[in-house]
Image: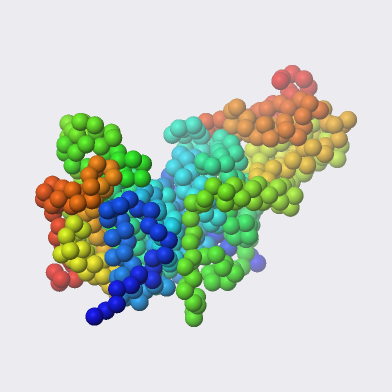
Amino acid sequence: MAEYKRPSCLKTTPSGFCPGCMHSLSTKLIAEVIDDLGQQQNACHIVPVGCSTLNLLYWKGDIVGAAHGRAPAVATGFKRTNPERLVFTYQGDGDLAAIGLAEIIGAANRGENFTVIFANNQTYGMTGGQMAPTTLIGQKTTTTRFGRDAATTGFPMKMAEIISELEAPVFVARYALNTPKGINEARKGIKKAFELQLAGKGFTFIELLMNCPTNWGMTPLQSLDYMESTTVPFFKPGVYKDKEADK
Amino acid sequence: MAKVFMKGNEAIAEAAVRGGCRFFAGYPITPQNEIPEYLSWRLPEVGGTFVQGESEVASINMVYGAAAGGCRAMTSSSGPGISLKAEGISYLAGTKLPAVIVNISRGGPGLGSIQPAQSDYFQATKALGHGGFKVMVFAPATLQEAVDLTYNAWEYAERDRNPVMILMDGCLGAIMELVELPEMKTADRAGTKTWALQRREGEARLDRMLTPYFPEAMLEYENTTRGKLYEKWAENDVMVEEFMLEDAEYVVAAYGISARVAKEAILRLREEGFKVGMIRPITLNPFPKKSFANLDYSQVKGIIDIELAIPAQMKDDIALEVKDRAPIYTYGRSGGVLLDDESTYIAIKKIIEGGAK
């Protein structure tokens, strides 16, 4: 039986993510995969703006801090000039699907050879729970106090589906982190994306369905149930594109 | 070395390649399009990378990423596009990353016009983005100067770990002149850039971080350090042309294309016996303060600031040095309307003869 230990890319700094928040979990998954692949020294983490910025404090490894939404552009410049590196961004939904829409679509469409890990918790966690592009219809946030109304705010954006419609991306998948099965599949998906990148195959996109107990106003356990009953049926987990498998 | 006949924008692009630039990202905007067009084929020739970004915002952030990886990187644009790059330039300054940003300036504000203007002086020298940082600003007046300044721009950028701006009007971008191109520099990425996140052979794991995020006290320290850097520029890095100042009673202040037009007028006025000289800032930041401060004000009767900008923008910097020791007159055109030899000559003459304020 393998010994359970802290992945080498996580500092011993106590996590400041809220109790029950899945950012700790997803970050750990990424760090475990990097250890599995022996990429501790080679990995470069492009850290954007949002709760994900806290990774500046917890991540141990090469880090480039990017402006809000611009991580895919920063990753483009970095990876193009350092093609041997394992480069990934870890971006929230406000960062990726609102302010950074042009950058994510541009990078995906060019088929940039790096990995984007998209943390979708349907809210702006860092700024206190405003509506995100992924907020569900009827979901209450600090800027949609009576629930998100499609008439004035549109509909939640399904990023994995949108990215998979582009020609260039090689692997696009969504996983939900509310069950052990989902967590295991997510780890495998991240590993597959990193392996494809290291093989020079092209753009890979992993969407992780996550929670935000604090801003959802739920206990961590309630948030798991809510994900199962509400979030997961809307943002359906699955592999949306796998060019290598389709060959 | 033999001289070649080149267009301004292309001369800057070639000088960048020879200066070691191996990454360019940009977005089309007139009047600078020849820079990305040239580099789109030229950079791959030397093993470099060209990316046409989805926007100016993305392009400057690609430059940020390439700079973080230790590559000499550049972007170019014009007024409206530089505004979009403001965020990224501020991040470059905040993260202390070297890069070169070229502004082939046009009429503004807003969409303005695509014709040449010098109305981005304030933006370039005072606030190229949020947060109160500065960058060195080079303002060439000839294509040879544009080549030389671009060629050496990364030496300053890397020395200071701070972006550098080349501010050149659309007129110089579009004209053709003979230029002597310098030797190709070795694009040494590993070299002395210990701060860059590049992998070096046989190197132990380093866990490095490049970010503009700092805890408050550290950020204050960084800002204090930046302030000292700006003072050093003022002391050591000022570039200026002082033209016929010895006996000058009237001193024209002009940079870039305006200085060329003004020089023609000055030579003509000299033939008529008017004692006119010129101070031409080559670095707009650091501004050649001493050139203005140390003029002999028992001799100088007036300063005439000539710009392709209305209202004149450099005037504020001049006034800080001249104080109330001489009146400062301005003449210029704006919005993409150019200065012409005859009108400029008449304008200076009128000021001297007291016919205009």
**Closer-to-camera residue (B192/B344):** B192
Point out residue A182 in the picture as x, y percentages from the top left corner.
Answer: 17, 62
* Residue A137 placement, left or right of B28: left
Residue at screen point 78% across, 41% down: B291
**Closer-to-camera residue (B296/B224):** B224
Point out residue A171 in the picture as x, y percentages from the top left corner.
Answer: 22, 64
* Residue B75 placement, left or right of A143: right
Quarter the C terminus of chain A occupies:
bottom left
Point out residue B67 in the picture as x, y percentages from the top left corner.
Answer: 50, 60
* Residue A224 placement, left or right of B23: left
What colouring style does the render use?
Answer: rainbow
* In the depicted structure, whether residue B181 falls above or below residue B231: below
Point out residue B149 in the picture as x, y percentages from the top left corner.
Answer: 63, 55
Residue A151 position by quadrant: top left
Residue at screen point 71% across, 51% down: B232
Quarter the N terminus of chain A occupies:
bottom left
Q: Find the residue positioned furthest to the right.
A: B298
Residue at screen point 31% across, 43% down: A124
Residue B277 position by quadrant: top right
| Visible residue check, residue B229 | yes
